Image (spheres, grey):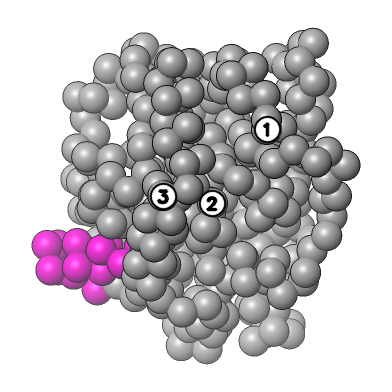
């Protein structure tokens, strides 16, 4: 069969790659054309648009880049028509994917959404589009099944969280691609995967380095961002950037400073204490405050429905506050309590193997 997959961010590239590997196992004649990144390419997909061309962050930034977005939508529709897939698989990235889904449904393509749009956070009205344009929906957060089925009467499947697969694969490989030449314990810095958020966050995070002389700070570099970009922000600080080796870095870390998003959950599954740091443009922040209706921004706290990890957002995200909270998670007693709570979090995510289960469902049952 022919599959067309659309992922617009680094996390989608990761989850898409694991899905693709298993699709090919269940369908050895699979032809896969995709929007994604290097991981999806290495898994066996033909990449027609790299996600680094697609990542626009925040309300204001989307408006500024509207012309590019509309051009991408036109290209995507033309490319799908030319490829004529049996199944279209959307991975997160709802602003773009729901537009394509509407068009795809009208053109009688089979539409599958893997990693549901987070409409429980904002724009819940999108449920109307999902019901109308999506044939099959897979969710990866435990509370989403009840949200879609009980609140909105739309049947979905929860087959576990794919990050469990990614981290299990990493642990099974006994990956040793990061060797520490410094005897100091490591604090990881995960400033995001988009240039906009890295530019906003990295300087603030680096501002605390001198307050922790007993530790070495290492930046987890995103695969789509060139080293020069990081070095222009770091300037004369003696800080190492490790590209595309986030799990290796985190697994050797004492603690981490993390922007919101998938990285918070990855850090928790690897059982590393963390502080969430997040700032965006003032316009985007004010719009988010008005429209977004969630208590937390990290997946860890959202899943547990409590502040398991400290979130320093916008005005609270200051050097003083980061120093204070990082000292707390480095304290042994606080660390042990947090790690116990991480176990409870991980138990809610299901069992490893979700990528295989979902691929089997898509290939053999849909």
Apparent side of residue 11 relative to residue 133 in the rendered image (left or right): right
Task: State the CA–CA distance, disc 3 to disc 1.
Answer: 19 Å
Q: Which mark is residue 215?
A: 1
Q: Which residue is mark 3?
A: 333
Indicate the position of residue 247 as horizontal and vertical percent values: 67, 54
Task: Please tell me which residue lies in front, 313 or 134.
Answer: 313
Nearer the camera: disc 1 or disc 2: 1
Give the CA distance from mark 1 to mark 2: 15 Å
Specify which label sits upstream in the sequence, 3 or 1. Answer: 1
Residue 276 visible to an observer of this rendering: no
19 up-or-down from 218: above or below: below
Q: Secondary structure at mark 1?
A: strand
- The residue located at (51%, 40%) in the rendering is 330
| Residue at 19%, 62% in the rendered image | 147
Q: What stretch of residues is rendered in magenta?
A: 137-155
Q: Which residue is mark 2?
A: 272
Is residue 138 found inside the magenta-colored segment of the image?
yes
Quarter containing the C terminus: bottom left
On screen, residue 312 above or below 316: below
x and y percent of residue 341 in the render?
Answer: 36, 60
Q: Which residue is located at x 52 percent, y 29 percent?
A: 56
């Amino acid at each position: 069969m022919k599959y067309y997959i659309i992922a617009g961010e680094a996390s989608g590239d990761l989850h898409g790659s694991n899905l693709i590997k298993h699709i090919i196992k269940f369908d050895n004649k699979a032809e896969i054309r995709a929007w994604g990144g290097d991981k999806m390419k290495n898994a066996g997909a033909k990449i027609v648009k790299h996600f680094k061309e697609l990542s626009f962050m925040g309300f204001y930034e989307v408006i500024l880049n509207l012309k590019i977005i509309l051009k991408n939508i036109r290209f995507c529709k033309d490319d799908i028509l030319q490829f004529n897939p049996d199944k279209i698989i959307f991975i997160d990235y709802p602003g773009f994917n729901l537009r394509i889904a509407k068009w795809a449904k009208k053109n009688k393509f089979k539409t599958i959404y893997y990693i549901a749009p987070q409409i429980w956070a904002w724009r819940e009205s999108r449920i109307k589009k999902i019901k109308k344009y999506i044939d099959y929906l897979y969710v990866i957060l435990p509370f989403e099944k009840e949200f879609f089925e009980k609140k909105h009467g739309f049947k979905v499947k929860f087959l576990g969280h794919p990050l469990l697969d990614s981290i299990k694969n990493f642990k099974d490989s006994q990956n040793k691609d990061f060797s520490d030449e410094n005897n100091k314990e490591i604090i990881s810095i995960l400033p995001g995967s988009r240039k906009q958020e890295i530019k906003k966050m990295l300087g603030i995070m680096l501002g605390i380095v001198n307050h922790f002389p007993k530790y070495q700070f290492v930046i987890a570099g995103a695969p789509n961002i060139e080293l020069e970009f990081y070095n222009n922000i770091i300037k004369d600080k003696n800080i190492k950037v490790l590209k595309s080796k986030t799990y290796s870095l985190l697994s050797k870390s004492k603690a981490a400073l993390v922007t919101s998003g998938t990285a918070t959950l990855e850090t928790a599954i690897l059982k590393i204490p963390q502080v969430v740091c997040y700032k965006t443009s003032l316009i985007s922040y004010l719009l988010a405050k008005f429209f977004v209706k969630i208590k937390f921004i990290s997946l860890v706290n959202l899943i547990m429905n409590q502040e398991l990890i400290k979130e320093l957002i916008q005005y609270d995200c200051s050097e003083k506050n980061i120093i204070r909270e990082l000292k707390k998670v480095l304290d042994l007693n606080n660390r042990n309590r947090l790690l116990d709570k991480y176990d409870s979090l991980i138990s809610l995510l299901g069992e490893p193997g979700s990528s295989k289960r979902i691929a089997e469902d898509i290939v053999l049952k849909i």
